[in-house]
Image: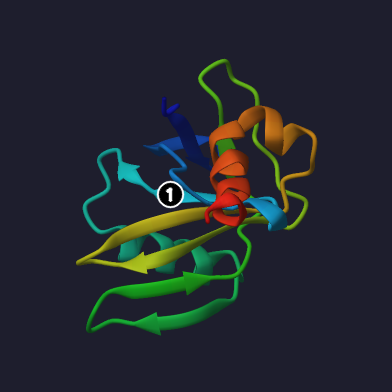
Amino acid sequence: MSKLYNITLSGTLIGTSDLEKADAPMGVAFGLIEFNGIESPYEFFKEYCLKNNIVINTDDPEFEFIDTQVISELKVFRQDGMEIKGVAGNAITGMKDEGYEISILGIPYPFYEEEFPHHVKEYENMFNKE
């Protein structure tokens, strides 16, 4: 059962994500963003990063690929309004053809386990296969 999370940038809702992927031991959850009225996510994030002095690790205009450092004003909320916080913050990676993902880095346990039990279970199952 997937949950839908709201993603905001500087207080404005920019889209949603299921946070369908994970690196459970690292406390990381990430997923594709379903954007809300943003025509070019690449231009949107690039402009935001440049304006706010956020480092862009990789920027390829040809493929509209972008990989950002942590963006402090990028926030993820559960449907009940609770923020999902990672100690290392949130970042964006992606390209036009494959979509853009948000990563929440360093979500502390036991919260991670409570919020994403399916990711923890999936990780544990990797080691229980014969």
Tell me the SS state at disc 1.
Answer: strand
**Left or right, residue 92 beside residue 89:** left
As drawn, 75 above or below 97? above
**Left or right, residue 126 beside residue 112:** left
> In the rendering, at what x and y percent does residue 109 appear?
79, 40
> In the rendering, at what x and y percent does residue 12 appear?
47, 36
Q: Nearer the viewer, residue 127 or 18?
A: 127
Q: Residue at position x 30%, y 42% from top?
A: 34
Instruction: Classify residue 65 by image quadrant.
Output: bottom left
Q: Nearer the viewer, residue 70 or 111?
A: 111
Q: Please name the amino acid that badge 1 sits on.
A: Gly
As drawn, 105 above or below 116? below
Q: Residue at position x 45%, y 26% from top?
A: 3
> In the rendering, at what x and y percent does residue 46 appear?
42, 69
**Left or right, residue 26 beside residue 63:** right
Residue receiving disc 1: 31
Q: Nearer the viewer, residue 3 or 67?
A: 3
Q: Residue furthest front?
A: 130
In this rendering, the count of numbered labels is 1
Q: Residue at position x 27%, y 74% from top?
A: 64
As drawn, 19 above or below 115? below
As drawn, 59 above or below 77? below
